[in-house]
Image (spheres, grey):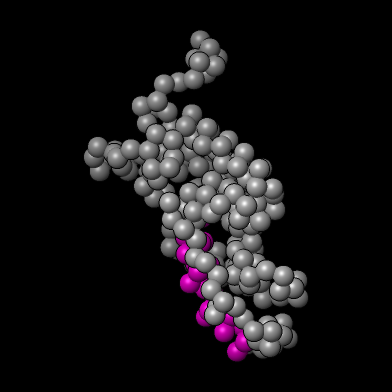
Amino acid sequence: MPRPDRDEPSLEPDPATLARARAGERAAQEELLRRHYPAVHRSAFRLVGNPEDAEDLAQECFVRAFRSLEHYRGDGPFLGWLRRILVHLAQDRYRAEGRAGEARALPPELPGGREPGSEAEERELARSVADALAALAAPLRTTLLLRLREGLEYEEIGTLTGVTPETARTRVMKARKLLERLLARHLGLPARAGERRRDA
């Protein structure tokens, strides 16, 4: 499972830089952007799945952050604060678009993860995964992607999404079950008994 980019002390902005950035000094804002953009962009890519959308989302994150710097009180890592903004923007995008971005290969952590038998099967499976992710409610999709693509623990996911670790765990479990149902045909999984009864 991939691990998140850890907040290195050397990346933390000094109070003077933050104060100048809050005052609208362009050089200070560019310094914050230079230090943190690569990590924010990597997280954005893991959430939306393609470089173009990731770049848009990362840029939007910094625009929002620079407008809201007065709300950052230094009670946690600056990069963690940026990631919370990023996650909220990603969830807003999911709700607005109602679809997933370009899907990557099915991660082995997803239910029934397997290697496709051919390039055509891989493309079909990628489309199916994208459709299945799009069918998830925004909170479920965000939580699942933070767990699988960012490799975050439930406590970290809870901090980013504003819920308890227990709620984060429940959302991941629910998302997995829904994906298992939606992808059952492609993964060779049997239909659930309840579904068979409803279809009968």
The percent coordinates of residue 163 (x first, y second) are: 69, 49
Residue 168 position (above or below residue 28): above
Q: Nearer the viewer, residue 78 or 91?
A: 78
Range of residues picked out in magenta: 27-48
Q: Residue furthest top?
A: 200
Judge whether residue 33 is colored magenta: yes
Which residue is drawn at the image coordinates 52% and 66% (left, top)? 6
The percent coordinates of residue 24 (x first, y second) are: 70, 85
Residue 198 position (above or below residue 79): above
Which residue is drawn at the image coordinates 72% and 70% (left, top)? 75
Predominant SS along the magenta part: helix
Q: Nearer the viewer, residue 198 or 170?
A: 170
Q: How many marks?
A: 0
Q: Is residue 34 visible?
A: yes
Residue 78 position (above or below residue 18): above
The percent coordinates of residue 19 (x first, y second) are: 71, 85
Q: Nearer the viewer, residue 94 or 173?
A: 173
Q: Residue furthest front?
A: 9
The percent coordinates of residue 35 (x first, y second) are: 53, 79
Which residue is drawn at the image coordinates 57% and 84% (left, top)? 31
Q: Is residue 48 visible?
A: no
Residue 169 position (above or below residue 183): below
Which residue is drawn at the image coordinates 54% and 80% (left, top)? 10
Residue 20 horizontal side relative to residue 179, left or right: right
